[in-house]
Image: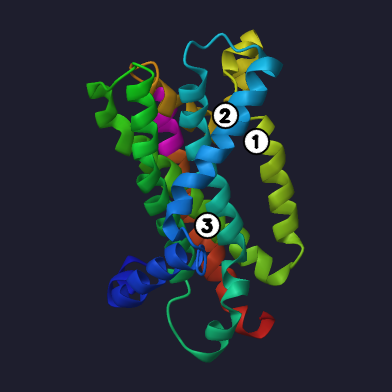
Amino acid sequence: MLKNLYQYRELFKSNVKKEIRGKYKGSFLGVLWSFVNPLLMTLVYAIVFPFILKSGEPHYVTYIVIGILPWNFFTTVISQGTFTFLSNAGIIKKVYFPREILPVSVATSGLVNFIICIPIICVFLLCSGIGFSWYMLLLPLVIIAEYLLLLGIIFITGSINVYIRDFEYIVNFFVTMLFYATPVLYSSELFGDFAWILRLNPMTIIIESYRHILYYQQFPNMFNLIGILVISILLLIFGIFVFKKLEKGFAEEL
């Protein structure tokens, strides 16, 4: 797969650019919506949820920004990645190219958008007085873990969706439900002895790792984080295996 990506690197790069620009094509603000969307979401949550959850976090707006942006990265890639083969059915049927370029382009464009949004977190860290620490050097490890996790998932969901067209709706419903089982707006510590149940969700570990590094300025739970990294790699390998098995019938199904 890496060999294919290298040989078709120009197509890969142009596809990543298309994914980034195409999302906001024709809009006045263009790529600036990558900043505006999470800020608007944060504003809504910051107004509503302090009254519902009665959070004791001293800088709650910063707290939820650190949770919302990685979650937005997750949901955007899952949604676009599950539909990527269907949305590119025309070119798949007409031209040969390594099909793996499509899900990798979706995940990579999502990664670029997320990196573009990191300055938003930095602004909130500065304005809240939390500031920065050397623990931010661990941030790439968390980002890589999330990226690999997403890539593994969309290889599977995108491939299955070619054969079962209703699958994307099932995935979207599951992701919506997963939002409430992930500590995006709250701390898993609210569940006390039952917090371990939430940590069965890989995104719980990932978002907690972002918060430990950026908000609490301390080491994340390295055992959990390395565990998620290993799981993400194994899921990616399995995802590529599923993709290779199902890819043979893409042209006929599409």
Q: Which residues are magenta?
A: 223-229
Query: Which three-letter amino acid code belongs to the residue tagged 1?
Result: Phe
Q: Position of residue 224 (x, y in %)?
A: 44, 26
Of the image marks 3 and 2, the number of the one nearer the N terminus: 2
Image quadrant where residue 56 sits? top right
Label ID, residue 179: 1
Query: Which three-letter amino acid code belongs to the residue tagged 3?
Result: Gly
Query: Which three-letter amino acid code belongs to the residue tagged 2?
Result: Val
Name the residue located 69 percent from the left edge and 51 percent from the top edge.
Answer: 172
Marks 1/3: CA–CA distance: 23 Å
What colouring style does the render use? rainbow
Question: Which element type, helix, strand or loop, lies under badge 2?
Answer: loop
Q: Which residue is mark 3?
A: 239
Q: Which residue is mark 2?
A: 184
Marks 2/1: CA–CA distance: 7 Å
From the viewer's side, name the closer residue of 99 and 49.
49
The answer to whether 42 is drawn above or below residue 31 in the figure is: above
Question: Which element type, helix, strand or loop, lies under badge 3?
Answer: helix
Question: Which element type, helix, strand or loop, lies under badge 1?
Answer: helix
